[in-house]
Image (cartoon, helix red, strand yellow):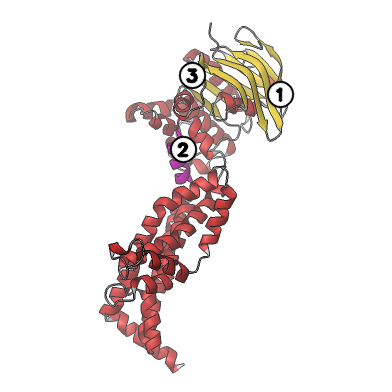
Amino acid sequence: MTALYALEGIRKSRGPVFSLAIPALELMEGGIHALSGANGSGKSTLLSLLAFLDRPTEGRLRFAGETVSWNTRSLARLRRQVTLLHQSPWLFRGSVFENVAWGLALRGVNGGTRRTRVFEALEAVGLSGFEKRDAQSLSGGEAQRTAMARAIALEPRVLLLDEPYSGVDRAAVETAESLIASMPARGTTVLLTTHDTAQLARPGGNIIRLAEGKVVSAKGAPSCAVV
Amino acid sequence: MDFLTDSVRAALVLILALDPDIASAALTSLQVAACSILLAAIPAIPVGLAVGLLDFPGRRAAVLALNSLMAVPTVLVGLLVYMVISRRGPLGGLDLLFTPSAIVLGGILLAGPIVATLVMNAAEGADRRIIPTAMTLGAGPLRAGLKFAAEIRLGIVAALVAGFGRVLSEVGVAMMLGGNIRGYTRTMTTAIALETGKGEFGTGVGLGLILMTIALLVNILFNLVLQRSRP
């Protein structure tokens, strides 16, 4: 079985220091994978690589068997399969509806279907009725949920979540957890980061631990393995 | 005191009577300033965005060049363009000298660095998450750049207003390249210089009032746009 992601000799440097050094790591398709580690352990850097937003200084990254060539055309195609939800997401100027619909419009999803998917996504995150609200006037938690709706509306093959439970209240955490738990059934592989060990057990599945830019353990094979 | 009040009174009479010379100068000023800023914006906005967003070899030199170009005296711009478009210059065959097009050419060179620098500053000050967010939602570099520009549109509009004001209020380029030809290349600023030199302060003050009114209206318009864009 081909790994969804295969990292080989990946190193990412920030200036003279390597912030990420992963000799080999495979991530299989399906399920929910958790990436844990302290602040500065390289979680966000790894997510940026996996979202094809940043390229490694060294090494090879394969996605679904295809070696990522990092040229503009292939990156645009790959990015449409993977969506990263940042820890502190940016909402564009405009309404909540416009924000959630933006990625769908880029993909050429027609008006009626777009509208349906926006409404479904907002309902899934508990923001029904927020369509006309100005995105810049939302609270931190509402903004986080809007960004989540914007991501899931795209029905990506991979959803990368950077600290998805930060800044949201307990009730919203439960909504987010059940939503994340439902993603694999919709064909979306989820990889989320957290430094909260209590959160690791809840979504269930595989856990990759990072420390100082290195993978120190990966549990839950065969869907995730340090090779 | 009488001198001042007499000048203002004479100015108001000329404005209310829709003096054709004043109307022509005002219209020419608006036309060359509008054309200059529109044409300057085409290269200046992308350049400002690129310098503000991208890290490339020579970026610091580009920033320095843009900042320096903002301070170039208008007469120097006028002189350089004059040398290029005069009969003996490389573009002499185009017969541009002493036409509104020549003033527009100078206006582009004046406004371009201002627009590019202010857009660059707006891009540098913008949130770093905009581009990655657009890209992870599926945008290519061009669409992400356009989305970024839309997010900082107020900064871009402010840059355009500043560039428009610079061209509208300058006198060196209009005088040297336009030649201050009545009813053709005479702008408000060159007319003010001419009328003041002749001792016709009423006309000069009248044109000055119109110039200030236009500047005020442009700023009011900008503030309305600003208020509408804020949540």
What is the x, y in percent for residue A82?
A: 50, 23
Asked if A111 appears above or below B77 in the picture, the reply is above
Amino acid type for the residue under numbered disc 3? Arg
Q: Which residue is denoted by mark 1 in the rendering?
A: A37
Q: Quadrant of residue A53?
A: top right
> Is B144 in front, or is B105?
B105
Please give left or right for residue B87 compared with residue B108 in the image.
left
What is the x, y in percent for residue B218?
A: 41, 64
Q: Give the residue drawn at x 31%, y 70%.
A: B28
Tell me whether marks 3 and 1 sit on the same chain. Answer: yes
Amino acid type for the residue under numbered disc 2? Ala
Most common SS among magenta residues: helix
> Is B153 in front, or is B65?
B65
What is the x, y in percent for residue A169?
A: 62, 31
What is the x, y in percent for residue A198?
A: 70, 20
Which subunit holds the residue at mark 3? A
Q: Circle 3: is it few (<14), some (14-19), or many (20+) Cα within 10 Å?
A: many
Tell me whether marks 2 and 1 sit on the same chain. Answer: no
Start and end of the magenta stretch? B138-152
Q: Is residue B212 magenta?
A: no
Residue A185 visible (yes or no): yes
